[in-house]
Structures are given as structure tokens and as C-alpha cells.
Amino acid sequence: MFNYDLFLDFFIALFALLNPFLAIPLFLGLTSDYSPGQRQRTALVTAFTIFLALIVAALVGDQLLGLFGVHTPSFKIAGGLIVLTIALGMLKDSKNDEARAEEVIETRAERAGKNIAIYPLAIPLLAGPGVFVTTIVFSSRVDGLGDFNTFILAILAIVLINWLAMASTQKVARFISETAINIVTKVLGILLAAVSVEMILAGVDEHFLPLYGLG
């Protein structure tokens, strides 16, 4: 059975973190000297890499936590704090954007003809630590085949949106100004902050309530 709450919560979190509006100038900066064909292939490989990486994170996340003896509630609290830090960075002035721009310039100077679709474009520029932490945290809500299918659909939906943004980056970039990107990023930062607080509160509830016989 399709879990609408899980889909919406996870999709909003991923949308804010992967931010297709910010992916457009990022992708354009790294592929400015590519031919249209090269740009399309890079967009496809990047999107597929993100999709595959998130699926792997969802499947092995709990096992990794168990291997290191980390309880899911503790990881939710830690993950929520990490995501909150990212959200607060999105709400600040354009320092993070400037850092990304500098990284793009350095990457272009160093790549020397190498394929940048998997690294550094897909990981870590687009899908950074916050994306993987969020995926692992939300995967703990998966209970049954219906939830798993919902989870996969959420990942697929955001990956498709990012792929479309990158594939049509030159056309879309003409209609999206830097100011618009900053405004959207700020709004997504607020949403992401709310998601991170929910993650922290869920971890606190799961960790402390059972100690008092309330969970």
C-alpha cells in the first residue's frame, strides 16, 4: 500500500537537499565547454549515480549502523543535527554558494578531460553527506513492501527532476536568475530545518520515552 506521508516527507527532504534549482548553475559551470551530446550523457550518468547511491544507502544503512553499534534513535538525533546545520547554511548569505562556485572552478581546472559525472558532480557536489544521512534515517520508517516501493518512488521522483533540470540546463538557466535561486534556496532551507527538527524529536522520543515506560 502506498504510504503518502512517507513519500511526502522524504521527497520534501530530498528536494531541499538536492535542490534542482541550484543544480542548474552548478551543472552548467562544470559542463560549459561540453558539447550538447556530452552534456546529455553527463546528466544521465549523474542522475543514475545518485539514484543507485541512495538505493544502496537505504538498503545497507541499518546494517552499517548495527555493525558499528549505533542505535537508530541516536543516528536520527545526530543526522538531524547534521541536516539542521546544512539548513542553517542555506538560510545564511551566499557564502555556501560562493564556496561551491570556487569548487566548481577548481574542478574545471583539474579535471583535464576526465568524466566528472560520478565524481565530483553526483557525489559529493549534488548528493552530499546530508543526502545520505537523510536517506538512512527515513529508511528506518520503511515497514513492508508498500513502504519500500514508496521509498523507491520518492528517490526516483527527485532524481528525475534533477535529471530534467540538468538535461535542459541551458534553456532553463535563461529564465532563472541568481536572485530567484537564492530565494528558492532560502525557502527550501526553512523546509529542511523543519525536517531536521522532526528527525531530532523522533530520535529523542524513541531514545528517552522507553526509559520512562512511555514508549
Image (tube, rainbow, N blue to C red):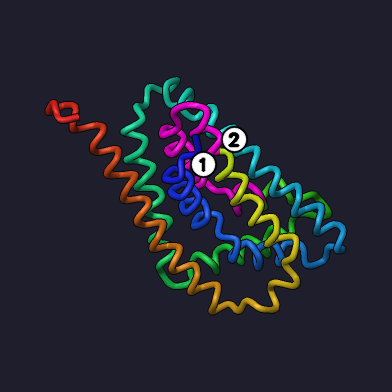
Q: As shown in the figure, which amino acid type bears the numbered disc 2?
A: Ile
Tell me where the magenta segment starts and ends, as one range.
Answer: 122-151
Among the 4 quarters of the image, the one containing residue 192: bottom left
Question: Residue 13 has which mark?
Answer: none
Q: Residues within 10 Å of mark 2 (few under 14, many from 20)?
A: many
Q: Which residue occupies the extreme left position in the image?
A: 212
Q: Is residue 139 magenta?
A: yes
Quarter of the C terminus within the rendering: top left
Q: Is residue 166 magenta?
A: no
Residue at image location 72% in from the left, 67% down from the top? 169
Question: What percent of the width, then of the height, locates residue 188?
Answer: 45, 63
Find disc 2 in the rendering and name its residue. Answer: 55
Circle 1 is placed at which residue position?
A: 132
Q: Position of residue 133 (x, y in %)?
A: 46, 41
Q: Which numbered disc flags the more N-terminal residue, 1 or 2?
A: 2
Q: Nearer the viewer, residue 160 or 149?
A: 149
Horizontal side of residue 186 vs 113, given as left or right:
left
